[in-house]
Amino acid sequence: MTGRTISFEFFPPRTPEAVRRLETTRARLAGFGPAFFSVTFGAGGSTRDLTLETVLAVREATGIECAPHISCIGTPAAELREILQRYCAHGIRRVVALRGDMPSGLTGFGELRYANELVEFIRRETGRQFHIEVAAYPEFHPQAPTAAADLANFKRKVDAGADSAITQYFFNPDAYFRFVDDCTRMGITIPIVPGIMPITNFSQLARFSEMCGAEIPRWLAKRLQDFGDDRAAIREFGIDVTTALCARLLEHGAPGLHFYTMNQFEALEAVFQRLGLSREHGLGRGAQALA
């Protein structure tokens, strides 16, 4: 079980209260020994300064590597070059390279339209300066015309120079296992780490899933609907579902787990406790209990 990692995604806080919340969350989750934290990047670079500010604050406070997201759609190449230069100057060594969403009100894609083009651009501009994470979609990208086309798109990102991948969140582990098997048959050997979204708010989860194309299985949606507005019951049930998903992924060889935290820590701590992951020991030791 050695060599497996956990990592956590944050988004840049915009208010003093949100800053304080993230300070608490990063401190609590740092104790689990993550390989890195990541910080999101708004559509068209709309949070570029906040992203870097958050990355530097998290890294300084925790001493843990922090990877900014960077997206290409709607962002000029000159601006991307400047961003990469700033990251290099601050000693950042890992980035999450994404196509990204089109900013509201803009219609032009910009010079780079796809994530594989962004990966190529980063390698061309900076060589091996960065460990590049890319996105993967076990249930396939919502804009992909076919599953085969989506797999081909993913391989283009790998061939362009990606070092590892983080998946969109999912609740059907078989979709992940099949995706990894398909990638292996295509000669893709980079680690593909499953992304995990803890369930704490059904309406929020449904909204996010509709936007990103993640499937909420019918049985899961029905159970969550039955709880109505009982947030405590949703949280408890969500912790059970998330724990079972993580355990199965680890038992069947996933190279790690990446958590979409929404800048919250409480549900994750409960999941880790049930998985047998203790603070200060991280995934390596706790996961041995699952072998």
Image (cartoon, rainbow, N blue to C red):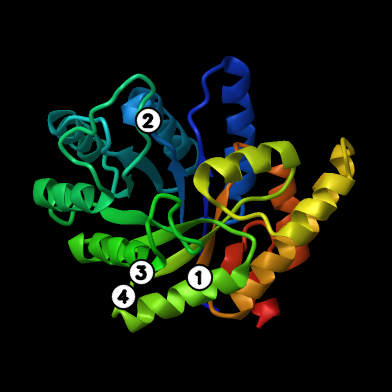
Pointer 1 residue: 4
Q: Find the distance from the CA under tag 2 to the CA under tag 4.
A: 29 Å
Name the spot of residue 269 as percent of width and height, x first: 72, 51
User: Disc 3 vs disc 4: Cβ atoms closer than 8 Å?
Assistant: no
Residue type, numbered disc 1: Arg
Quote the CA–CA distance across marks 2 and 1.
Answer: 31 Å
Can you identify the residue that label 2 sits on? Answer: 43
Q: Is residue 174 above or below residue 165?
A: below
* Residue nearest the observer in this picture, 3 or 236: 236
Task: Tell me where residue 251 appears, x and y as whole percent.
Answer: 63, 79
Crowdedness of circle 1 by 10 Å Cα count: few (<14), some, many (20+)? Answer: some
Please tell me whether mark 4 sits on a helix, a strand or a loop. loop
Residue type at mark 4 is Ile
The residues bearing labels 3 and 4 have C-alpha atoms spaced at a distance of 14 Å
Judging depth in this view, the residue of 184 and 126 nearest the camera is 184
The kind of secondary structure element at disc 3 is: helix
